[in-house]
Image (spheres, rainbow, N blue to C red):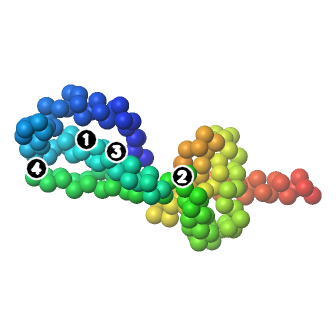
Amino acid sequence: MRQQLREPQLRRDIEGRRKSRILTGTKGNKLVITQFDKATCRTLGLEIEAALAAVAAKHGLKATYGGGSFDPSQFTCKIRLELATDNPNAETAERAKFTQLCDLFNLKADDYGAVIRSHRHGDLTIVGFEPSRPKFPIKVRKADGTLSVFSRDILALLSAQRTSAKVVAS
């Protein structure tokens, strides 16, 4: 995952030491970009992300700059729009995707939100799958709220916990 820059960091990048590299010309009172380079494109992408944040928030979304490509005369950037985590529809969409894919991982739809206790990682809550990631397809939420991905081996812990709970209950 990409680390997000906060607004003061973004402003420092824009107005700070990169200013001479990024904005090379002036036109009236506006600074003009004469050609694109890596630093220019990164800064522009972060500015675009910040500008789209208000529009995205208005519609219950989250906008993220996802890199791009450039040559000296053109810059193409990727912007990803996701449902915001505080959006009430976000969990239902995530749960629907979980229900659709749970059979691929030998789980039931009721296993959404199941807690796996791990000595190394603490309590992990199953929240979804990433089928496009064959090595780490299980998406979990850690106790501190961060999302992480794990291999299918983590499901063995869930199975072991269920088995031990059945033995104790008997």
Type of the residue with mark 2: Thr
Q: CA distance from mark 2 to mark 3?
A: 18 Å
Q: CA distance from mark 4 to mark 1?
A: 15 Å
Type of the residue with mark 3: Ala
Q: Which quarter of the picture shows residue 61?
A: bottom left
N-terminal-most mark, 2 or 3: 3
Q: Which quarter of the picture shows residue 156?
A: bottom right
Q: Is residue 66 left or right of residue 119?
A: left
Of badges 4 and 1, the one in the foreground is 1
Q: Could you say which disc has been placed on residue 72 in the image?
A: 4
Q: CA distance from mark 1 to mark 2?
A: 26 Å
Of badges 3 and 4, the one in the foreground is 3
Q: Can see residue 138?
A: no
Q: Secondary structure at mark 2?
A: loop
Considering every residue shown, the one lying at the far right of the view is 170
N-terminal-most mark, 4 or 1: 1
Q: Which residue lies under the disc numbered 1?
A: 43
N-terminal-most mark, 1 or 3: 1
Q: Which residue lies under the disc numbered 3?
A: 50
Q: Which residue lies under the disc numbered 2?
A: 85
- At 54% from the left and 52% from the top, the residue drawn is 85
The x and y percentages for residue 127 are 60, 56
Q: CA distance from mark 2 to mark 4?
A: 37 Å
- At 39% from the left and 44% from the top, the residue drawn is 2
- How packed mark 2 is, by other alpha carbons closer than 10 Å (few <14, some 14-19, many 20 or more), is few
Q: CA distance from mark 3 to mark 4?
A: 24 Å
Q: Secondary structure at mark 4?
A: loop
The x and y percentages for residue 137 are 53, 59
Of badges 1 and 3, the one in the foreground is 3
N-terminal-most mark, 3 or 4: 3
